[in-house]
Amino acid sequence: MENVEQYSSGNLFMIEEIDAENNVLCIANYILDKKAKVSVTDEQIEFYAITFDETIKRNMFLFVEYDEKRGVIIGK
């Protein structure tokens, strides 16, 4: 049987703002009434900045899975 703890239990947070200068994503989960600032790598900030701009052009929202216990974004 697989260890259940190996799977993350993240929640979806919407990206509100991208601070490319400091490599920080400002994210929020309005259902849980939570906000966070997450430091990411140069590669990740570039990916999120491009994707964020594209979603704004299409009047959409960009969400990421965020593991609050570890304070990290899960996946790309």
Image (cartoon, grey):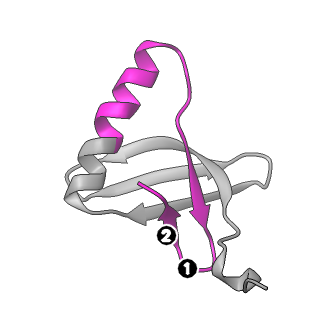
Label 1 – label 2 distance at C-alpha: 6 Å
Classify 23 as above or below 48. below
Q: In which quarter of the image is residue 32?
A: bottom right
Three-letter amino acid code of the residue under disc 2: Val
> For residue 3: magenta?
no
| Quarter of the figure that contains the C terminus | bottom left
Q: Mark 2 points at which residue?
A: 72
Residue 5's disc number: none
Residue 54's spot in the image, x, y percent? 37, 22
Classify 3 as above or below 47. below
Residue at image position (22%, 54%) is 43
Residue 18's spot in the image, x, y percent? 36, 45
- Range of residues picked out in magenta: 48-76
Circle 1 Cα neighbour tier, 10 Å, few/some/many (<14 / 14–19 / ≥20): few
Q: Quadrant of residue 69?
A: bottom right
Three-letter amino acid code of the residue under disc 1: Arg
Q: Nearer the viewer, residue 39 or 35?
A: 39
Residue at image position (29%, 33%) is 50
Q: Name the residue under label 1.
A: 70
* Secondary structure under the numbered disc 2 in the rendered image: strand
